[in-house]
Image (cartoon, rainbow, N blue to C red):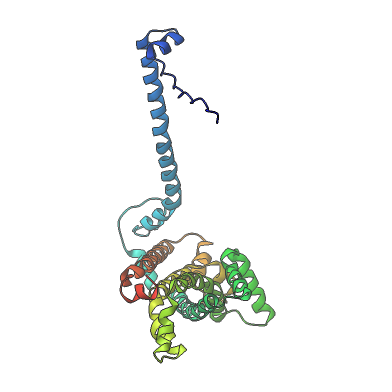
Amino acid sequence: MTLRPALKPQRRPAPRPLRAVATRTGSNPATGASRIRTTARRRRRGTDRKPRFALAVTVAFFALLYLPIGVVVLFSFNSQKSLTVFKDFSLRWYSAFFRDDVLLDSLGMSLRVSLVAMAGSLILGVALALGLVRCRSRLGSLAGLIMLVPLITPEIVTGVAAMMLFKGMGVTLSSGTVMLAEITFSISYVTVILRSRIAALNPEVEEAAMDLGATRWQALRLVTLPALLPSILASAVLVFALVFDDFVLAYFTTGVDPQPLSVRIYSAIRFGVQPTINAVGTLMLAGSIGLIALALFIPRLFGRRGGLDLLSGK
């Protein structure tokens, strides 16, 4: 048996003293230390400049994005017709909007279209989301991919295709064609939102309800749908806001009169921006912000405790 010589531990070279560094640079230790401190300060300055530059770019981006909107909101309260000089605070143009029968008819049509599209997309979206989650075949996966197509397709392509379809079928463009186009566009949003929520539910709870004597429809109505209620309400509010503000689909599928509010505003500004349009835009902006905030608040309002935790398997 041969004995191997023990390996000697390698010693790490001692750090070079400051004097050696200073001697190498051709200066005294004090000068070398000052150079080290100067280099450190420069590095800190470079590190500090990067967040400041990023902050400046972010502020400039949001300023360019929201400054025109702020100008519209500001001049909607202007007492004069001028769109460049703000004189006095007034609600004159809001009062003019509520006295304009044409704009009120367009507002009523937009509300009707939004409500019908919301109801139709919810009914079809809930059924489709349940079917996609419970269908484990390749056909279900293919249908799930097809449902994502409207989300990634440019809206102008969808609008032109819908208009050509209605014209080819000999259907007169009206509020009904706008509703059908908006329902087709909104189903995908409802399906995507509800599909993720349904996948998170615990299927054993619904099976337990059927073991206790409930039919499949009763288990769906009394167990599954109440668990989906927060997501359903959030989807409803989101779809209403999207359809109410939508312009592209409404423009290609609407008739002559009445027209949705977004199309009416576009027709009005072609002949010059009127102060009343600023008031209408401000009201639409406030309504959209309120609806989106409500859609984000609804899941928190219902919470994730109690029965919802049980249904989700937590």
Q: Quadrant of the N terminus?
A: top right
Q: For residue 305, which quarter of the picture? A: bottom left
Q: Nearer the viewer, residue 20 or 30?
A: 20
Q: Nearer the viewer, residue 286 or 216?
A: 216
Q: Is 312 situated above or below 50?
A: below
Q: Nearer the viewer, residue 179 or 122?
A: 122
Q: Quadrant of the C terminus?
A: bottom left
Q: Is 45 situated above or below 51?
A: above
Q: Position of residue 218 (x, y in %)?
A: 42, 89
Q: Nearer the viewer, residue 115 or 90?
A: 115
Residue at the spot 39% in from the left edge and 16% down from the top edge: 35
Q: Position of residue 40 (x, y in %)?
A: 39, 24
Residue at the spot 42% in from the left edge and 54% down from the top edge: 83
Q: Is 144 situated above or below 175?
A: above
Look at the image and tell me whether residue 100 can be seen: no
Numbered marks: total:
0
Left or right: where does residue 248 sit relative to residue 11?
right
Q: Position of residue 216 (x, y in %)?
A: 46, 88
